[in-house]
Amino acid sequence: MTILITGGAGYIGSHMVHDFVDAGEPVVVLDNLSNGFRFLIPAPVPFVSGSTGDQTLVSDVIARHGVTAIIHFAASAVVPESVAEPLKYYGNNTVNTCALLYTAIKSGVQQFIFSSTAAVYGAAEENPIRENSPTIPVSPYGTSKLMSEMMLHDTAKAYGLRFVILRYFNVAGADPRMRTGQATPAATHLIKVACEAATGKRPKLEVFGTDYPTPDGTCVRDYIHVSDLVQAHSSALAYLRSGGASATFNCGYGRGASVFEVVDAVRRASGRDFPVEVSPRRPGDPPSLVANVDRIRATLHWRPQFQNLDTIAAHALAWEKQLAARRKPS
């Protein structure tokens, strides 16, 4: 009954590991540490360094640990970078997912949870966005994830695999107990970057575009606390274990916040009026992405606990301070 967590040393994956450990679920982590950190994983958890594309390695991990379910977080996930380096994203996100699915089927794994993204919707005309809204990605990142979703559907039809696809909106915050959080040095997530500006790690915060068709001209996103997101994964696994059919769910709160609203929340949490500089738009950024979450609430009975922007900002800031203290030379 062991769960294989790919990318389990990363931001979201490490929260998932802690959640399962808290629940007494046996897990094994596979991560190449390109974006993850070993210190984010609880010491007793088995850790394997490697790629999801290494079919021999993954087959051995599944057999050795008795893996019955896979939660696949491992991916490259920076939209502007995907525009500049599309083949990196198709290789890591799509080709490696294909290899992982092939290995899972050969090894008899029948439950698969896939970390997808709201980027599959592109510049959605409908907000809030439903799961059956048109999927027209505007970045290679979104396309690489959508291609993986398509492979999952075809694999399920051919081999009987049951899956849940979770389309994340904007994930932020940190473990309330401060055991893990976002540790990537060059992170591009807005709340993380704003917290770095608030703690002095960055001299300023850049706002990319103020001419979008939104109330204050900045991009609007549906920010979801990382702890609520991992609870959605736990609920998805329980759903599959109980015989639930393959399904796709949005993961958000159903309401958006603008870039300037996020800046204000971090300023409130920190008590600092850090500098903000307006820059041109970035390629691949849609004006607004807000989730319709009726399906996940009705089907998985998911009930988020931290759906407040100030709470998300406060947890992210507390983690940033702890991370700075950890990195400070003794």
Image (cartoon, grey):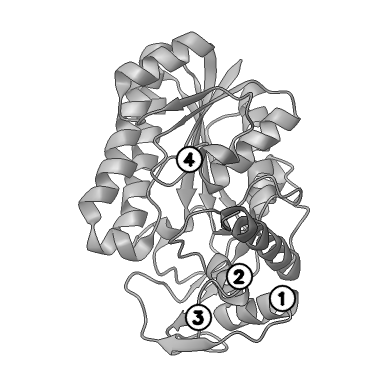
Residue type at mark 3 is Pro
Q: Which of marks 3 and 1 is nearer the N terminus?
A: 3
Q: Which residue is drawn at 38% across and 15% down?
A: 59
**Disc 1 to disc 4, C-alpha distance:** 31 Å
**Image quadrant where residue 230 sits:** top right
Circles 1 and 2 in contact, beta carbons < 8 Å: yes
Relative horizontal placement of residue 54, taking residue 109 as reference (left or right): left
**Disc 1 to disc 2, C-alpha distance:** 8 Å
Q: Which of marks 1 and 4 is nearer the N terminus?
A: 4
Relative horizontal placement of residue 228, taking residue 144 as reference (left or right): right
Q: Earlier in the sequence, mark 4 or mark 3?
A: 4
Residue type at mark 4 is Phe
* Residue at numbered disc 1: 270
* Residue at numbered disc 2: 195
Relative horizontal placement of residue 200, taking residue 227 as reference (left or right): left
Residue nearest the observer in this picture, 326 or 181: 326
| SS category of the residue bearing label 2 | helix
Q: Which of marks 2 and 3 is in front?
A: 3
Residue type at mark 1 is Ser
* Residue at numbered disc 3: 203
